[in-house]
């Protein structure tokens, strides 16, 4: 299932800002230098400024310091290799492809259901549009469910994207029950023999208990209408977010069982280093990254390329 | 966190107590903890470094006084410094100035998803409440349906929010285009909005601009052009309170281009520690004027540095807790309740009502976390909100008579209630006892002054009611713990029951 042909150059392009402001600088800083305590402190500062977080940073730095004291590392270039190796090791081999419903054998048609959730302003609707386009371009029929009945203009926003893509939207009343929209969308997806149904939900802070329960209800409704649904639960995380993203990931995962992360807004100067902490806390892979405003600005997350791109020098 | 910080300083300074002045070595380790706390709260690395260096300089040379808790004192120093860092340099009040001639122009700007459009609505509601007429102008021509969203928000403010002033909406929906297609058009839309606002005699014109990345030169230029054309009286940067280290980069870029006058921090109702507040203030020097604290249009508050400083240090936020409570209980309700309590007429129905409004405020763990000192203590404790379901169940299984007069409940009734709510009879007894203790206490307390009240609370605490360990119920208003019954002999318990 070759969803989204990944090209190293495209990720590098998306991460230009990251490289220039953060680790591109590391390369210059390290080249031809001999390691010392001051240099190690500087590397630590750079990791923290990338939102990597105190605990993962400390672990990386402690390891580096130990190797330095033991005389295993002394040249700046070796430090780079060390950091790359350690950062890559944080992303174990795992399946980062989208999960699809198993093909129906003689039984009724089973659409794949993707439930998308996240805090307000993370970029859910835009990410859904990108995902829908990529799926459609691969020959899938796609249906969108507008379960954000709360925010003013949210349904319209999804509809405008859908019109541009030529896919249908199932919608309910403004202020209505999002569970009912999910219900209708599932039935419509089955009736129309749709391949993939993507459900957009209202942004909600993970601290708002009633809204989190509402999300559980949406999930339960889909599970009742379509066996095995939702096949994929995508949490949309903003790359500019700080350490609170870990709390978000924990709470959303506790409520609806997140199966993958979509990391958005990597085209700015934000480094998205918090995904390292999220990976540790959740054990769930980052599946996609958003690197721009157009519908094609979606990339599969590939740790090696991610790290390589961070250190690339042009 | 707060405990850890203050502990760190205490250990460092205890050895010194009465011996002399603080040296750098004494506090280095403790200062390291402060540094970690700030970094974990997402304060920018460079800001943290500067802050701890300065705090260190401050501390070194200070006399350690015998009478004070030195650890607490150091935390106090740190806290005050944080407050000073976040407070406006000129001591100016939050709020929107009055320009003459009107309209006062306020331009909102920020990254995508920071909450500009919602905040525009909240600011309009804030102004409407204060009798100032508003026009909301849709200058976001890029995000699909952004204009629709602002129109709906404007209508909601006009129709649903309190205050007498008019709320208008200005947009040119035919100018909307895809991302990057209509750059510059927003400038003309804003100019025409200004002319319209002037004609209609509007007091404040709020411009809702499109979210943009600070590295997108073309779009940043568009903002500069709006800024030059309309010369807004206030340029407000809208920043997501959950932002990490990058807050400093984006705030700096917006400030360099637009010379922002103030910051609005959104999504402060999350559990973020909000270190971005310090970073943004540090890099722009512009005061934080408002914070967004909820989905509703009235959820905009003026910014108070001490409260956020406490939150960043993990000291809890009692004020927010009180405000949450106020959202749930009206003044009249509170007064009626106080009267009942004073007369010792508290009923199980009142108790249930209170329990329900308490639960509406959020999960118990989150509420308790707002209390100073409780946050870290319950970090790993699993507080089960289902316990409260059972309490509700027990009260629901009582008759109306029993709820009014809890002392009617005898053995047979107790069994019936237990059966009805699916719990053991001991749990029913437990609840009744707790209820009894609370209503007695409230009657006692209402007759006392402040000091007496505190004494009574302390007595209750010493009786084991304030302990957090082994609680059946999360500790509310001095409810007694399950463990406490074991100290009463069966014989004594029987006597107590008979008395009742």
Image (tube, coloured by chain):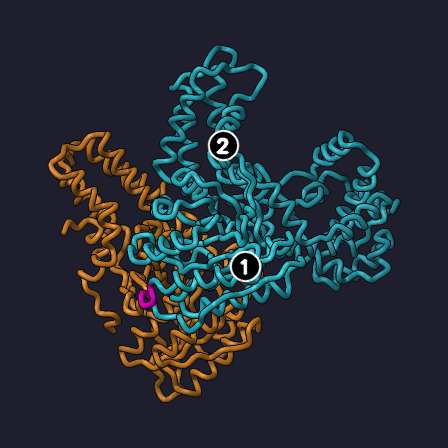
Chain colours: A orange, B cyan
Q: Residue furthest bottom?
A: A106
Chain label for disc 2: B
Label 1, on which residue? B121
Relative to B102, residue B485 above or below = above
Going from N to C along the chain, the mark reached first, 1 or 2, is: 2
Q: Residue furthest top?
A: B19
Image: magenta residue range: B179-183
> Where residue A254 sits: x, y (%)?
47, 58
> Where residue B33 sits: x, y (%)?
42, 32
> Where residue B16 sits: x, y (%)?
47, 15
Residues at discs 1 and 2 both on one chain:
yes
Label 2, on which residue? B84
Q: Pointer 2: residues within 10 angstroms few (<14), some, or many (20+)?
A: some
A49 relative to B453 in the view: left or right: left
From the viewer's side, name the closer residue of B455 and B261.
B261
Label 1 SS:
helix
Query: Is residue B182 within the magenta segment?
Result: yes
Query: Is residue B44 within the magenta segment?
Result: no
From the viewer's side, name the closer residue of B40 and A156.
A156
* Quadrant of res B391: bottom right
- The label on residue B45 is none
């Amino acid at each position: 299932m070759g969803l989204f042909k990944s090209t190293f150059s495209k990720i590098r392009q998306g991460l230009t800002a990251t490289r220039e402001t953060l680790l591109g600088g590391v390369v210059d800083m390290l080249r031809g230098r001999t390691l010392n305590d001051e240099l190690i402190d500087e590397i630590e500062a750079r990791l923290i400024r990338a939102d990597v977080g105190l605990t993962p940073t400390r672990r990386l730095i402690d390891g580096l310091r130990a190797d330095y004291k033991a005389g295993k590392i002394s040249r700046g270039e070796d430090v780079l290799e060390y950091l790359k190796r350690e950062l890559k090791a944080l992303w174990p081999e795992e399946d980062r492809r989208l999960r699809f419903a198993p093909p129906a054998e003689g039984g009724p048609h089973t659409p794949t259901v993707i439930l998308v959730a996240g805090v307000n302003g993370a970029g859910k609707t835009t990410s859904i549009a990108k995902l829908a386009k990529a799926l459609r371009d691969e020959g899938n029929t796609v249906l969108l469910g507008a379960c954000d009945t709360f925010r003013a203009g949210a349904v319209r926003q999804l509809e405008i994207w859908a019109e541009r893509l030529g896919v249908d939207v199932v919608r309910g009343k403004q202020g209505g029950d999002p569970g009912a929209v999910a219900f209708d969308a599932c039935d419509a997806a089955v009736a129309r023999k749709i391949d993939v149904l993507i459900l957009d939900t209202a942004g909600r802070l993970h601290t708002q208990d009633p809204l989190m329960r509402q999300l559980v209800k949406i999930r339960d409704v889909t599970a009742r209408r379509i066996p095995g649904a939702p096949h994929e639960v995508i949490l949309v995380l903003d790359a500019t977010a700080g350490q609170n993203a870990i709390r978000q990931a924990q709470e959303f995962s506790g409520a609806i069982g997140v199966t993958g992360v979509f990391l958005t807004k990597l085209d700015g100067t934000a480094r998205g280093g918090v995904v390292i902490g999220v990976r540790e806390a959740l054990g769930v892979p980052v599946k996609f990254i958003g690197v721009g405003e157009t519908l094609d600005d979606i990339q599969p997350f590939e740790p090696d390329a991610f790290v390589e791109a961070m250190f690339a020098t042009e | 966190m707060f405990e850890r910080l203050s502990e760190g300083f205490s250990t460092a300074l205890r050895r010194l107590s009465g011996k002399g002045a603080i040296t750098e070595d004494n506090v280095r380790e403790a200062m390291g903890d402060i540094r970690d706390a700030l970094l974990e709260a997402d304060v920018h690395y460079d800001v943290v470094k500067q802050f701890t260096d300065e705090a260190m300089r401050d501390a070194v040379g200070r006399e350690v006084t015998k009478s004070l808790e030195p650890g607490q004192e150091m935390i106090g120093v740190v806290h005050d410094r944080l407050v000073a860092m976040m407070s406006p340099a000129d001591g100016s009040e939050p709020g929107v100035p009055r320009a003459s001639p009107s309209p006062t122009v306020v331009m909102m700007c920020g990254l995508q998803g920071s909450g500009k459009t919602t905040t525009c609505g909240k600011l309009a509601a804030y102004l409407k409440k204060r009798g100032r007429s508003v026009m909301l102008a849709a200058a976001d021509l890029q995000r699909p349906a952004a204009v629709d969203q602002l129109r709906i928000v404007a209508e909601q403010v006009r129709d649903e929010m309190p205050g007498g002033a008019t709320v208008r909406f200005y947009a040119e929906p035919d100018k909307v285009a895809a991302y990057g297609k209509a750059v510059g058009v927003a400038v003309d839309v804003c100019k025409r909005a200004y002319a319209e606002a002037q004609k209609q005699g509007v007091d404040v014109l709020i411009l809702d601009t499109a979210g943009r990345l600070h590295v997108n030169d073309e779009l940043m230029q568009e903002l500069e052009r709006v800024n030059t054309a309309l010369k807004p009286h206030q340029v407000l940067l809208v920043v997501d309170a959950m932002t990490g280290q990058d807050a400093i980069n984006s705030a700096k870029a917006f400030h360099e281009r637009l010379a922002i006058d103030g910051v609005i921090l959104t999504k402060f109702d999350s559990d973020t520690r909000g270190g971005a507040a310090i970073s943004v203030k540090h890099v722009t020097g512009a005061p934080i004027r408002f914070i967004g604290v909820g989905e509703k249009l009235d959820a905009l508050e003026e910014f108070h540095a001490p409260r956020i400083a406490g939150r960043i240090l993990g000291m809890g936020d009692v004020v927010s807790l009180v405000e949450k409570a106020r959202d749930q209980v009206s003044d009249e309700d509170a007064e009626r309740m106080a009267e009942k309590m004073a007369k010792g007429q508290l009923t199980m129905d009142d108790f249930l009502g209170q329990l329900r409004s308490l639960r509406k405020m959020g999960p118990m763990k989150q509420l308790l976390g707002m209390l100073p000192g409780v946050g870290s203590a319950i970090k790993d404790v699993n507080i089960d909100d289902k316990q409260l379901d059972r309490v509700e169940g027990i009260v629901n299984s009582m008759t109306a008579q029993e709820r009014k007069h809890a002392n009617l409940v005898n053995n047979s009734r107790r069994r019936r209630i237990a059966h009805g709510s699916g719990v053991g009879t001991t749990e029913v007894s437990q609840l009744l006892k707790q209820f009894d203790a609370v209503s007695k206490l409230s009657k006692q307390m209402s007759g006392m002054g402040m000091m007496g009240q505190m004494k009574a609370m302390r007595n209750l605490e010493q009786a084991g009611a304030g302990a957090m360990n082994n609680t059946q119920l999360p500790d509310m208003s001095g409810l007694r713990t399950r463990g406490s019954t074991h100290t009463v002999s069966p014989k004594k318990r029987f006597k107590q029951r008979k008395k009742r």
